[in-house]
Amino acid sequence: KQEVTQIPAALSVPEGENLVLNCSFTDSAIYNLQWFRQDPGKGLTSLLLIQSSQREQTSGRLNASLDKSSGRSTLYIAASQPGDSATYLCAATGANSKLTFGKGITLSVRP
Amino acid sequence: KAGVTQTPRYLIKTRGQQVTLSCSPISGHRSVSWYQQTPGQGLQFLFEYFSETQRNKGNFPGRFSGRQFSNSRSEMNVSTLELGDSALYLCASSLEGQGVSGAFFGQGTRLTVV
């Protein structure tokens, strides 16, 4: 059974800092890994999708990497801004097309 | 291109009642999945429908059911509501399945059972 872990559960950083959010998964047989952003009381916004054959994806100030062999993915946020404050979730898609989510990391960027 | 639309956005129901939630996927997407999100359990998979057939199912009691129509719109029904069913219910739309093209989520339906 796939388990996805995100540690720490919360993170507070000053504006402008570069930061890395970590995601680990137990079963390396995944189709892809997605990173999502969730604002309070809202749905999930897809940030980046990394297929199992890829090593990384980039979108603007965001860069996500995937290392299947070690069961890890990281989301790098460059030059963080207060508007980046949200909960970030990673999800691994298994062979049955089911997403397994981590509990998320709540990020607070202080002005 | 319109995103995933969930209706209603908010619901308040009484214990023992039943409720139906609706999800309209992105045009052309054939897969719709449903998730329950609570502070304690996080996001949990309910079921996935693809071309009107249930393809996958999570570990939820039979009170939770769903269906998908020929236009790919999906409905989720919860019967005999319990207080613990209070949650944010999210649906995700995908072109062929989440394993291929990723998942795109709606804004969710906030269900409160009193």
Image (spheres, coloured by chain):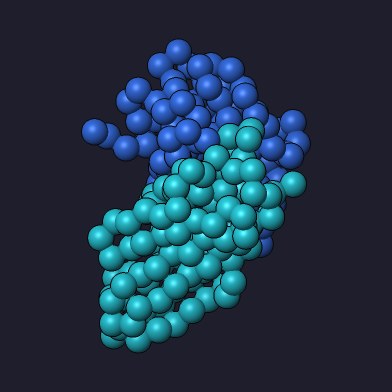
Chain colours: A cyan, B blue
For the point 72% across and 39% down, the residue is B60
Q: Nearer the viewer, residue A103 or A27?
A: A27
Q: What residue appears at the point 45 percent right and 59 percent down from the top-left corner?
A: A65
| B41 relative position to B61: left or right | left
Q: Position of residue B98 (x, y in %)?
A: 50, 35
Q: Is residue B45 visible?
A: no
User: At 62% from the left edge and 60% from the top edge, which residue is drawn?
Assistant: A70
Expressed as whole percent of the image width and height from the top left, the position of residue B76 reads 56, 31
State which quarter of the image contains the C terminus of chain A.
Answer: bottom left
In terms of depth relative to the viewer, which is nearer, B109 or B3?
A: B3
Residue occupying the far top of the picture: B70
Q: Tell me: residue B52, above or below residue B20.
A: above
Q: Is residue B6 above or below residue B27?
A: below
Question: How many callouts does the rendering have?
Answer: 0
Q: Quadrant of residue A81?
A: bottom left
**Which sits in the foreground, B87 or B53?**
B53
Q: Closest to the observer: B22 or B17?
A: B22
Q: Residue at x 62, y 55 (%)?
A: A69
Residue B73 image point, x, y percent: 44, 23
User: Does the image show residue A77?
Assistant: yes
**Image height of B29 relative to A12, above or below:** above
For this view, does A45 lie left or right of residue A79? right
